[in-house]
Amino acid sequence: MHKILFAASEIHPLIKTGGLGDVAGSLPVALKGLRQDIRLIMPAYREAVQHAGDLQTVATLSVSGATDPVTLLEGWLPGTKIRLYLVAAPHYFDRPGGPYGPNGQDWPDNAARFALFARAAAAVALDQAGLGWQPDIIHCNDWQTGLIPALLAGASPRPATIFTIHNLAYQGLFSWEVFQSLALPQAWWSPQALEFYGQCSFIKGGLVFADWLTTVSPTYAQEIRTPAFGCGLEGLLQHRAQRLVGILNGADYQSWDPRHDPFIAKNYNVRTLNLKAANKADLQRRFNLPQIKDVPLLGHVGRLVDQKGIDLLLDIIPALLQQPLQLAVLGSGEPRFEQALLKWAQRYPERIGVHIGYNEELAHCIEAGADIFAMPSRFEPCGLNQIYSLRYGTVPVVRRTGGLADSVVNSSAETLAAASATGFLFNEASALALLDELQRALNWYAQPRKWRALMKQGMGQDFSWQHSARQYLKLYRQAQHGPSEA
Ligand code: ADP
Ligand code: GLC
C-alpha cells in the first residue's frame, strides 16, 4: 500500500472546468479501490467549500509570501471515503469561479494563488502540517501544481514526485516581475529550471524536477516529444523520455453510463438500444429542433478553443446544410467561436441548435441523444467525450491524434468483420478531411444494420479506470523504490 497525496486545481464534483476535473475526481477513487491510502489536496475555492459538506480546520500553515493565515480544511470527497484537504487562504480562493474566473478568464493573481497552493501542498507532503501523515508519493497535475516538484526537489526525506501532463499547451507563463514577486529561489530563473524564453514557466517545475512524468495517452506521450505538439518543450521532454509514460485516462462509468445516468430522458443499454430514440427526441426538444426520428443528429460538447478544431466544424456547416442533418452544440470559450455558432443557429433554427455555457446535464443529454459525436481536435491529450460517446452508442468521428487515436477504432469492412470498429478517424486537421469523414459516417448511418453493429461495438468497450489505475500503481512502486536520478 502506498500513501499518495494527489494534488489538482479542480476535482469533480467539487469544481470542474474540463477533463482534469473528471480525472481528479475518478482516478483517486479507482486507486482507493486498489486499497491505496490516497488523499486529495486542492485550493479551498468558495464553490468547492460549498460542495464539500462538513469540513474541519486541522492545521495552520506558515506559508512564505502569504498575507493572511493559511489553514488546512479536512473533509471527504463527496460520496467516497477519500480524505480531502482544502488549502484555505481567503484572499486568494474565497471568490467566485475556481481556478479561473466565472467566465473562464485567468485571474490576474493566478501565479500567486498557485504558488501559495504549491507551498501548502509541499508542506503537507513533508509532514510539516502536523497531520502525522507523510505520503510516499505526491502526484501533481498540470501547471497549477508545477511548483510542487520543484519545491520538494531539495528536501530529504521527501516523497517521490509524479507530474501528469493533461495539456502541454497551458503552461502557466508569467513575467520576470511576477517571478520576483513570488520570492522563489533566484537559481530557478535559468533554462535548466523554470525560465522559458524570458518568462517563468510553472509547468517546467513539473517537467524538470518531478521524478517521473506521465501524460494521459500513449500517443500524446510520443507527440509531445516532437515540435508539432511539444509547444517548445519537446527538447526537454526528449531529454526526459526515459521518465515519461503515457497512461490512457479511464472513464467514470458511475457518472457516464446510459444504464443509470440520472440526467437523461430514458435509460438504456446495449439490449434496449431502441430506447435511445427517446433521448434523441428529448435532445431535439431541448435544442428546439424538429423531432424527426430518422435525420442524423450530430453532437458536440467542449471548450470552444482552437485545440478542439471547432473552426473546422464551423467551416463545413454550409456543406452539411446541403443534406438532411441536425447539429446540437454545447460549449463555451472564445467569443469568436461562440458568436459564429450562434449566428448559424439563428439562421437555421430547424437544423442547428447551440447552447453557449457550461451545463453538465445537457452534456449528458447530448451523449445520450446524438447519433454521431464530432471531435475534430487539432491535438487531444486524451479526450473524454469520445470515450463517453462510445458507452452511449453515439458513434465518434474524431481526428487521429492523442487519446482519440488510442480510444477509437476506424470503421472499415475489415474492422467491422473483426468486430473491432467503433468510430471514424481522419488524419489531416482540415475542414475537407473532417467533411469527408463525416460523409463516410453518414453513409454508414444510412445502412442501419452496419450502424447498429458499430453502436454495439462501441458500447461494449471498457475504458473503466481499473486498468489505468493499475498502471499508475506500477509507476508509484517504481517511483518509490527505484532510483530517483533522471
Ligand atoms: P478538455 O479537458 O480538454 O476540456 P476532455 O474531453 O478531456 O476535454 O473533457 C471535457 C469534460 O468537460 C467532459 O466531461 C465534458 O463533458 C465537459 N465539458 C466541456 N465543456 C462543457 C460544457 N460546456 N458543459 C458541460 N460540460 C462540458
Ligand atoms: C486536458 C486535455 C484532455 C484530457 C484532459 C484530462 O484538459 O485537453 O484531452 O482528456 O485534460 O486528462
Image: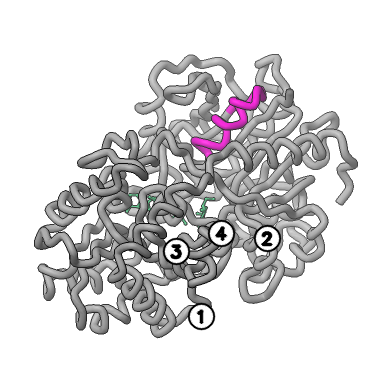
Residue pointed to by mark 1: 428
Q: Secondary structure at mark 2?
A: helix
Q: Are marks 4 and 2 in contact (CB under 8 Å)?
A: no
Given this view, does label 3 or label 4 mark the residue nearer the observer?
3
Q: Position of residue 343 (x, y in %)?
A: 18, 73
* C-alpha span from label 4 to label 2: 10 Å
Within 10 angstroms of label 1, few (less than 14), some, or many (20 or more) residues?
A: some
Residue pointed to by mark 3: 423
Say which residue appears at 40% left-offset and 32% top-offset.
48
Point out the tag, 2 or 3, that comes first from the N-terminus: 2
Q: Secondary structure at mark 4?
A: helix
- Mark 4 Cβ inside 8 Å of ligand 2: yes
**What's under tag 1, amino acid-wise?**
Glu
Given this view, does label 2 or label 3 mark the residue nearer the observer?
3
Point out the tag, 4 or 1, that comes first from the N-terminus: 4
Q: Nearer the viewer, residue 369 or 160?
A: 369
Extent of the magenta region? 24-39
Image: 334 above or below 453: below
Question: Image quadrant of residue 266?
Answer: top left
Image: 130 above or below 347: above
**What's under tag 2, amino acid-wise?**
Ala
Say which residue appears at 21% left-offset and 79% top-offset.
323
Point out the tag, 4 or 2, that comes first from the N-terminus: 2
Given this view, does label 1 or label 3 mark the residue nearer the observer?
3
Within 10 angstroms of label 3, few (less than 14), some, or many (20 or more) residues?
A: many
Q: Are marks 2 and 3 in contact (CB under 8 Å)?
A: no
Image: 190 above or below 400: above
Q: Are marks 1 and 3 in contact (CB under 8 Å)?
A: no
Question: Image quadrant of residue 296?
Answer: bottom left
Question: Image quadrant of residue 373?
Answer: bottom left
